[in-house]
Amino acid sequence: TDPALIRNFCIIAHIDHGKSTLADRMLQITGVVEDRQMRAQYLDRMDIERERGITIKSQAVRIPFTALDDRTYTLNLIDTPGHVDFTYEVSRSLAACEGAILLVDAAQGIEAQTLANLYMALDNDLTIIPVLNKIDLPAAQPEKYAEELAGIIGCEPSDVLKVSAKTGEGVEDLLNEIVTQMTPPVGDADAPARAMIFDSVYDTYRGVVTYVRVIDGKLSPRERIQMMSTRASHEILEIGVSSPEPTKCGGLGVGEVGYIITGVKDVRQSKVGDTITALNRPATDMLEGYQEPKPMVFSGLYPIEGTDYPVLRDALEKLQLNDASLVFEPETSAALGFGFRCGFLGLLHLEITRARLEREFNLDLISTAPNVIYRVDMEDGTEHVVTNPSEFPAGKIASIYEPVVKATVLSPSEFIGQIMELCQDRRGELHGMDYLSEDRVEMRYTLPMAEIVFDFFDHLKSRTKGYASLDYEPKGEVAADLVKVDILLQGEPVDAFSAIVHKEKSYAYGVAMTKKLRELIPRQQFEVPVQAAIGARVIARENIRAIRKDVLAKCYGGDISRKRKLLEKQKEGKKRMKMVGRVEVPQEAFISALSTD
Ligand code: GDP
Ligand code: MG
C-alpha cells in the first residue's frame, strides 16, 4: 500500500466513554464486519474483557475506507485499554500511531484517565482529534464539554466533533476527519527493514502472534528476521493483517500494521518494544523502545487444595506466555502451604489474573493481602528488597523506602474538601490544583503507592458520589516510618498475616487482625493468645478461651453408628486443619481472615 493512503490511529478515552462501541461502529459502517456478525465490543476478545466491559490487551484492526476524495484509504485502528494498571499498553499503542481520537463522554466531561492519555499522546507528537461521544443521551451537554475540551487542547470549541457511537451519528464524518487531519506514515522504503513490536499475544494453535508496525523497508513471508535487542533470529512463517480476522498477505511495507508468526512459544521471545530487522540486511539503529512494565503489587497465591499446586504452576506458566508483566516464584507459608509469590501491575491485574486462573484452569485459590515493594537499608550497610512482608529482614534498620505515585484527581469542585481529607488521611502531599472549568478541578498529589492501590479508589468514589476520577503513575520511592507487624498465635507468628504498615497505623492494624482471628479460630483444648507485635513488642492481644473438645460426649450412650459418623467427620475436618505451633486452625479461618471485608 502507498503510505500516503495509510492512517494509523488509536482512540484514547476514560473507561466507559465508548471506545469499544466507537470501534464497533467503525467496523460496521465500513463493512469490515457484516451486520449479522456484529456483536458488541467486537474487538474485546477475552471473555473477561467482555464481562467486565474493559479492554485489557490492545488489538489492531485494518479498516478500508473510501473517503470524500473517492480514494480508498487503509485505516489501522489500535484499540487501547482504559485502566491505570494497563497504562504501559496505552503507551505502546500510541507509539505505533500518527494520530489519536480523544473521546469524551458528552454527559461526563473529561476524566483523569483522559488527561493522562492526552499528555502521553502529546508527548508522542500525535495529531489529536477531539470528539464528544454519546450525544444521543438526554443528559449530554455537548456545548459545555466542547468548551472544556477546547480549553485543554487549545483548539476552538467548533473543532470538537460530536458523535454517537451507539447510533452511528457523526461516525462517517469522523472517519473523513481522520483522513484529512492526520498525517500519513513516513518511512524509507529502500532502507533496511525496521518494524516495531507493539503487542505480542500467545495463541494455543498458532504460537506467539507478534503485532508490528513497519517503519522502514519491508517484511516478507519466509524471510529470516532478527530481534535487535537479543540478536535472536527467526523465520517468518506467516505474515498478515487483522481485518479483523487474521488474513495472510504478501508482506508489510512502510507504515503498515499487521502480524507475523515465527513459531516462538513465549511472548518474552518476541518482546514488546523490540525492533525487528532483516537478518541478511540488518538495520544499525534500534527504534526507541518502551519502558518494561514493572510489577507494583505482590501477593501470595495458594491453591486451597494442596494437591493443585502443580496445576497452579502450569497455569501460571501458561498465562505468562501471554503476559510478560506477570512474574512469580515459589513460596511456602506455614499457614497456607505451597504457593507462589506473584507480582502484578496493580490490583485489577491481580484480580483478572486470579479470575483467569480459577476459571480457565479450574483452581480454587486464596491470595494473601497485596503489598508493594519495600527497600530496606540496614545499619550494617546491606540492602534488602522486600516483596513479602514475612521476609522482612531482622536486625538494625537504618531506613525503609516505599514506592510513591504522582496522582491526579479530577472532580466537581464541590468535593475538594472531602478529597483533601481522604488524601491527607492516606499520607498524601498536595502539589497543585487547577480549575478546568468553573466547576471542575484537577488536584495533583504525591501519595504512597501502598495507600492508593487497595481501596483508595472506592473511598474516593464514595466521598464524591462517584464523580471523581483518578489516574496515577509511579514516581520513585521515599523514606517512610514503616514497621512490620506480626500476628502471633500462642507466640508463633502466622506468616500469611505479617504486614508492613505505617507506624501510625500499626496499632489499628494489630487490633483489627487480632479481633478478626479471635472470632474465626475455634476454641482449642487450651487457651490461645492472639497477639500483634512489632519485633518483640506486643501492641494488641486477644484470647481464645479453652474448651474441652470431646465430640463423643455429645452422643449419650450406645448409638455406635452415630459415633462412627462423628469420628469420620472429625477426620475429614482435620485434613483441612493447619497447625500453627500447637494450635489447630481450620483453613477456612485463614481464608476468611484474608478476604477483604
Ligand atoms: P469503553 O470502556 O470506552 O470501551 O466503553 P464502551 O464502548 O464499553 O461503552 C461503555 C458504555 O457506554 C456501554 O454501555 C455502551 O453501550 C455505552 N455507549 C457507548 N457509546 C454510546 C453512545 O454513543 N450513546 C449511548 N447512549 N451509550 C453509549
Ligand atoms: Mg472497551
Image (cartoon, rainbow, N blue to C red):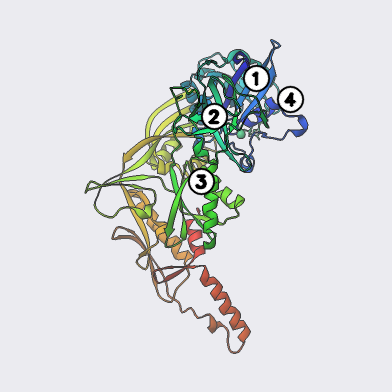
The amino acid at mark 2 is Arg
Earlier along the polypeptide chain: callout 4 or callout 1?
4
Earlier along the polypeptide chain: callout 4 or callout 2?
4
**SS at circle 4:** loop
Label 3 lies in ligand 2 vicinity (Cβ under 8 Å): no
Label 2 lies in ligand 2 vicinity (Cβ under 8 Å): no
Q: Residue at x 76, y 30 (%)?
A: 35
Nearer to us: label 3 or label 4: 4
Q: Which residue, as the protein is rendered here, is positioned at the far right? A: 36
**SS at circle 3:** helix
User: What is the distance, in whole Å, between disc 3 and disc 2 at their CAs?
Assistant: 37 Å
Proximity of marks 1 and 3: CB atoms separated by less than 8 Å: no
User: What is the distance, in whole Å, between disc 1 and disc 2 at their CAs?
Assistant: 27 Å
> In the rendered view, would you say 485 is above or below 85?
below
Nearer to us: label 4 or label 2: 2
Crowding near the residue tagged with mark 4, few <14, some 14–19, many ≥20 C-alpha atoms within 10 Å:
few
The amino acid at mark 1 is Thr
> In the rendered view, would you say 85 is above or below 252?
below
What is the quadrant of residue 72 in the picture?
Answer: top right
Read off the residue under disc 4.
31
Crowding near the residue tagged with mark 1, few <14, some 14–19, many ≥20 C-alpha atoms within 10 Å:
many
Please tell me which residue lies in front, 584 or 539: 584
Q: Which residue, as the protein is rendered here, is positioned at the far left? A: 380
User: Which numbered marker is on residue 224?
Assistant: 2
